[in-house]
Image (spheres, grey):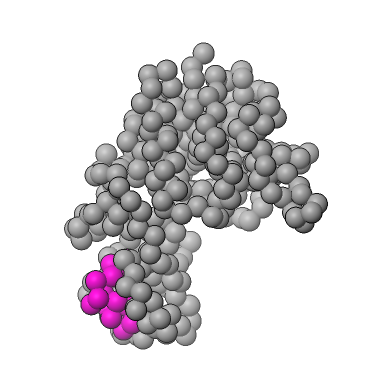
Amino acid sequence: MSRVAMVFTGGTISTLPDAAAGGNTPVLRGADILARSPRLADVAQIEPIDWGLVPASHLRFAQMLDIARVVDEALARPEIAGAVIVQGTDTIEETSFAYELLVRSDKPVVVTGAMRDGSSADFDGPRNLADAAVCALSPDFVGTAVQVVLNGLVVAARDVVKTHSTAMDTFQPREAAATGRVVDGRLVLVGAPARRGRLPRVPDHAVEDVHLIIAVAGIDGTLLRALRPLHPAGLVVAATGSGNTGADLLAAATELISDGTVIAQTTRCARGTVAPIYAFPGGGAMWQRAGALPSVFDGPKTRVALALGLAAGLGREQLAQLLAGRLPA
């Protein structure tokens, strides 16, 4: 039977209720979770790797780099057919995209977790692990995009979004169709999965000071001017509509650009991208004329791409290509 490396990092799937703490806390290691997932043994031989018990909301870029290295080390072994990263669901839409950019192996990489804790009557962890293992063993996913698998749905990391805070079917594609489903232990594809996109090189270190601000009605440049003395490496502005903000927000962003901060522009809308349509002060065209790089990804994914691209030492043209979704294979 083929072997799957399963990297356990924490999250809801690792939690149990703690009366003293007043809520769920991470306590279950990989072996504990596998013991609650008996059907998994029928799918694959699992090699558990305990990376940590970290809530997904705590994960930083340095930790994503480390997890990606652990995955690549496991996949370098010939007996390992694919890898599953098990984590909390809060930031799967970001971390899975980071692994898309970072992992060098062509073997399948799948990210999963659970929406219910290990004591819940409807604990979804076992099914999600089994479905993820099915995908990690599939030859259809060799050399293709990292996939997120929960509640039977398979969605490419670059497109997946968490649409509901607690629903089982929370993970959905933002724009494109889902990659497929796992039905009764069998992968059913909708179409040919996209090829994996990677950074040209893996960063040696993380760049953490890339910030995200969401434009709202009436917001000015106060927050950006407060950031200026810190000389942040990057900033993502999730603008309204097709890329528009108030004039003062753009003025403050221009000051950051003059100091060397790289600014990316995206939309806060659930779907669609920015476009240089409006030329009034703060309009989308004016942001791009000021030097903001347009992004086809949503705010959280744009931040991932910008932070990892800066960490990898990409120049402006390479960053522009990355944010445009032209990911080198």
Image quarter for residue 153? top right
Magenta stretch? 249-264
Residue 184, x across and y down, in percent:
62, 25
* Front one among 205 and 2: 205
Q: Is residue 42 left or right of residue 110?
A: right
Residue 108 placement, left or right of 202: right
Q: Identify which residue is drawn at 42% across, 67% down.
A: 212
Q: Is residue 268 above or below residue 215?
A: above
User: Could you say where residue 297 lies in the image, as x and y percent from the top left?
Assistant: 38, 57
Question: Viewer-proximal residue, 44 or 183?
Answer: 44
Q: Say whether residue 291 is visible.
A: yes
Question: Where is residue 113 shown, x and y percent of the image?
Answer: 59, 41
Vertical placement of residue 3 versus 195, above or below: above
Q: Residue at x 34, y 69 (%)?
A: 232
Q: Quadrant of residue 195?
A: top left
Does residue 240 sit above or below 76 in this rendering?
below
Q: Is residue 267 left or right of residue 263?
A: right
**Which residue is pictured at 42% across the width and 35% down the height?**
70
Name the spot of residue 288 as percent of width and height, x first. 26, 72
**Secondary structure mostly taken by the magenta-highlighted segment of the chain:** helix
Q: Quadrant of residue 181?
A: top right
Q: Is residue 272 magenta?
A: no
